[in-house]
Image (cartoon, grey):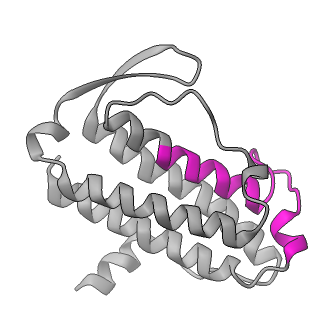
């Protein structure tokens, strides 16, 4: 894996997240807060989980091992979640843009939120973050569509075609 490939994946991730947030900006407060049967609940819970994942992995890549988790209640409004997401996105993209090819292929060590020690190759965990985001974006896209606010297609190939 090289830096150009990783940057492309994370630019796709950013593009797809933006489509989700644009569609979600049309929700009522009740729709944003509504529960659902998806693993992380409704839209707020699922987006909070996805934000937490991007945040915790970036911290791990930077040598930290946070022990706390984000909770949906940390984001009482759509605007508070979107603001925090955009802040994290800047930090994440700064890391992605600054990573060197050699580092991508190196092993890094971290602890889970429960203190369990792990090690992974950096690029593999970075690809995991994008893939993880795809899973939860599709869950949110389904909920948004049920509320009449489909984000449209979020396939990576559509992003790649736009770049050309």
Residue 103: x and y in percent read 15, 38
**Relative to 133, 59 lies left or right:** left
The residue at 28%/52% (across/down) is 95
Seen from this angle, which residue lies furthest top?
Answer: 116
Corner quadrant of residue 110: top left
**Relative to 92, 122 lies left or right:** left
The residue at 46%/51% (across/down) is 131
Residue 60 falls inside the magenta stretch: no
**Relative to 25, 98 lies left or right:** left
Residue 81: x and y in percent read 65, 63
Q: Which portion, as a residue range, is magenta?
A: 29-55
The residue at 40%/79% (across/down) is 158
- As drawn, 144 above or below 129: below
Residue 41 falls inside the magenta stretch: yes
- As drawn, 58 above or below 42: above
Residue 14: x and y in percent read 42, 68
Where, quadrant-wise, is the C terminus in this rendering?
A: bottom left
Name the chief secondary structure element in magenta.
helix
Res 50 seen here: yes
Res 154 seen here: no
Closest to the observer, 9 or 60: 60
The residue at 65%/58% (across/down) is 47
Seen from this angle, which residue lies furthest left?
Answer: 102
Residue 1: x and y in percent read 17, 46
């Amino acid at each position: 894996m090289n830096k150009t490939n990783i940057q492309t994946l994370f630019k796709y991730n950013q593009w797809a997240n933006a489509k989700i947030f644009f569609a979600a900006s049309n929700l009522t407060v009740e729709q944003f807060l509504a529960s659902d049967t998806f693993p992380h609940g409704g839209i707020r819970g699922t987006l909070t989980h996805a934000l937490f994942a991007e945040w915790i992995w970036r911290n791990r890549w930077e040598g930290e091992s946070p022990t706390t988790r984000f909770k949906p209640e940390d984001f009482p409004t759509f605007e508070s979640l979107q603001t925090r997401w955009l802040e994290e996105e800047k930090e994440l993209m700064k890391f992605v843009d600054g990573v060197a090819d050699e580092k991508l292929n190196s092993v890094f060590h971290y602890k889970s939120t429960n203190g369990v020690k792990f090690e992974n190759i950096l690029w593999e965990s970075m690809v995991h973050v994008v893939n993880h985001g795809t899973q939860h974006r599709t869950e949110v896209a389904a909920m948004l569509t049920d509320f009449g606010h489909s984000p449209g297609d979020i396939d990576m190939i559509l992003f790649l075609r736009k770049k050309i």
